[in-house]
Image: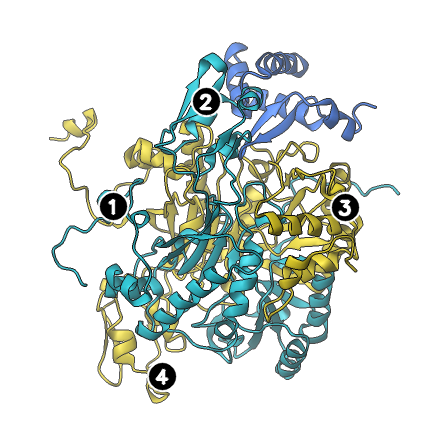
Amino acid sequence: MALPQRQTDIGPPKFDKFLPPVIKENYGQWKYHEELSGGTMVHVAESGAKIWTVRCASPRLLSTETIREISDLADEFCGGYLRFTTRHNVEFLVSDESRLQPLVDKLTTMKYMIGGIGDRVSNIVHTQGWVHCHSACTDASGLVKAIMDDLADYFTHKVLPNKVRLAVACCVNMCGAVHCSDIAVVAVHRKVPKIDHANVTKMCEIPTTVGSCPTSAIRPNPKDKTITINEEKCMYCGNCFTVCPPIDIHDPEEDGVAIVVGGKVGSLRTDPKFSKLAIPFFYNEPPRWPKVVDAIRNILETYEKHAKKHERVGEWVERIGWERFFSLTGIEFTFQHIDDFTFMRDTMRTSAAFKY
Amino acid sequence: MEQEAIQELIYAYSEKMSGKKKLKEKDIIKKISADAELDKDVVKKALRAMIDVGKLMYSYGGGASSVEIPTEEYLREKGMIK
Amino acid sequence: MSGKYKTPMLDELEKGPFPSFITEMKKATKISTTAEDALGQLEKSYQTKRGYWKHGGIVGVLGYGGGVIGRYSSLPDEFPGVAHYHTVRINQPSGFFYTSAALREICDIWDKYGSGMTNMHGSTGDLVLLGTTTDKLEAIFAEYSSRGWDLGSSGSAMRTPSCCVGPGRCEWACIDTLGLTYHLTQHFQDEMHRPAYPYKFKIKTAGCAVDCVAAIARADLSIIGTWKDDIQVDQAEVKAYADMGMNIQAEIAEMCPTECLKYDGGKITIDNKECTRCMHCIAKMTKALRPGKERGATILVGSKAPIVVGSLLSWVIVPFIKAEEPFEEVTELIENIIEWWDDNAKPRERIGELLEVKGMRPFLEAINVPPQPQQVREPRKDPFFFWTAADLEKK
């Protein structure tokens, strides 16, 4: 069968084709919103018009079968209108209030997980992992599934001091916002990569490979048209592997994940913050990474118990001090927690006032 | 200069650098426009026309893109050769 | 249904309340036999604790240099269905709005040529189709593009711009995030599809400082909606919050970072010139408080993930710029910013990294933005600074 004529550089369809009439009519004229439950809210326009949203978790990896199922639900309850969020949730956009409860009932019967709105845990932003990435040293989707199964109540109804944003990145390239999340998991290597010199010569640009190293651990070896790695300088980031595949950073027995906490992206009350290291390492324990799941629950529950209303994780820790964070959570403080990469001068304490 | 002549220069340079340095579009445009005293946009247009018909192709490695002479596999897949 | 491989470890991930990606992969086996091999290889990864995908290769559609990411199994003999298993990025509509008809159209084409697996959505924003072979790419592109869907981006290019829901469904949106993102996406089509930059360049647009799209953390160029005049206060609604039991003194006044908001037990007063527009009070009292009416955007530059020398958050470059249709002023600024980076960066150097090497002054001069205290958290600490000949002439 002949193919249709291709078009280039047309860009995406314009979004207004996909807006429900109530949004088109009240575009930019929203007045306020109210949370109706952990996963439902209503937005009210200046005109008095309303739109109801039902938010459900998705695993991000969706089959076309499930997308069709979601589409059928949108047809039945929302005039066919829906959207996705930046955190991989599905949002059903209900224009007719009488369809709201029937939709919630049907989604509940079909075991959709409704929630993620307000001062709760929302869906976890995450990366491709072993499912489809060359550089992954853990499986992001599996970790997300295990963590969210455990924290399901915090997604659907339990209220926290403020919203808590989680992320999982399957390597330090961090194709998710791990570096600025309340609690996040990032996969790390712990050993110097193994070099397949013959293939380095064949496949890699030496200057690019040398330039890829943040700690200047890689030096050219012009005689053999390859590179050498200074093992004392290597911090196992794996960027050399990205530009030169024969430098194999993977080591299944020594790869694993770290947990970082206290980051945020919004400017509310305090500036956006980077996440900081809480726990330097857990071994990969597929399929359910029980120690990682327990550690995240411990941090979340400690925050829930001690933070003031409206404090984000990072704001709470800054108020009580990191030394108190470690004592309250019972997390061990190690050499790995002290920055010896680029930020030591900014992160060491320069005051004689601190807690025990 | 005729576009075809510019394209011959581009191809010759790409061939010469093949296996030595991964050329970015900008490297080629800079070199040819300097050597032949041409406007950069003219060279860019000639280069793009080559890419559109598979005389050159975009390549990718380690997160960065470059321009290369197509492999046979690529040309066969695009129906350029049997 | 699935059955080619035994997947005892993956089956564990079908239990529990959160929707299971394994169930999704198993559903895809009804669409394509290759999804069986994807499951088989993933089970092997779970058993051996390592991935089996090779680096991206050279695949794409004629004329484009991005939008398709080559993906090959390192175990093609064991899992032949995923020997070639490429990713196709489809440019999402701004704000991720769809209709059921649009989604079915996407699914129909993908079922014909691919694995039946997707990501809704990738981290940059694209709708991601997971798993197809090189020989199908031109057909996939013809089918999608003829129906109005274009490819997204990859490699050293303008990456697919992305934004929050904005004025589509949010009362805090100070700029038209959806319209601006659509405009920028159209404006940079060539730069998205034909990778000619030193490295990737990401643009994200958030309607306010809550930043639901993580623009400040995840975009080389971050656009954040803001305002300049006074916060709009509805005192009747303030009273309603108090009547509902909100402790306005503790939760709002005492948590205001600049202490510019006062509550006298009845009314809220705001010393607006001391307000930093952080959004805390507005986000907590959405019925009573709203952003001002003189609206625009703050432009920040430079954020990225840790590779190579540590993560960066974006830095304030232009504190306030109008961002209204047809978006001319902001587009010109963005073009100037990118031009400076494109002219000065080494291969694989992000704009944040380049700024650390070159310093802010040459950049600000090149884009014609004056130094302003809003750009810094504090002035420099050490007495080392440059003077140019022109500086010395100013007696």
Residue C241: mark: 4
Chain-order first, disc 1 or disc 4:
4
- Amino acid at circle 2: Ile
Q: Nearer the viewer, mark 2 or mark 4?
A: 2
Residue at mark 3 to residue at mark 2: CA–CA distance: 46 Å
| Label 1 element class | loop
Residue under mark 4: which chain is it in?
Answer: C
Residue under mark 3: which chain is it in?
Answer: C
Q: Are marks 3 and 2 in contact (CB under 8 Å)?
A: no
Residue under mark 1: which chain is it in?
Answer: C
Instruction: Report the chain shown in cyan.
Output: A
Instruction: Report the chain shown in blue.
Output: B
For disc 3, the neighbor class at 10 Å (few under 14, some 14 to 19, many from 20) is many
| Label 4 element class | helix
- Amino acid at circle 4: Tyr
Tint of chain C = yellow
Q: Nearer the viewer, mark 1 or mark 4?
A: 4
The C terminus of chain C: image quadrant? top left
Residue A227: mark: 2
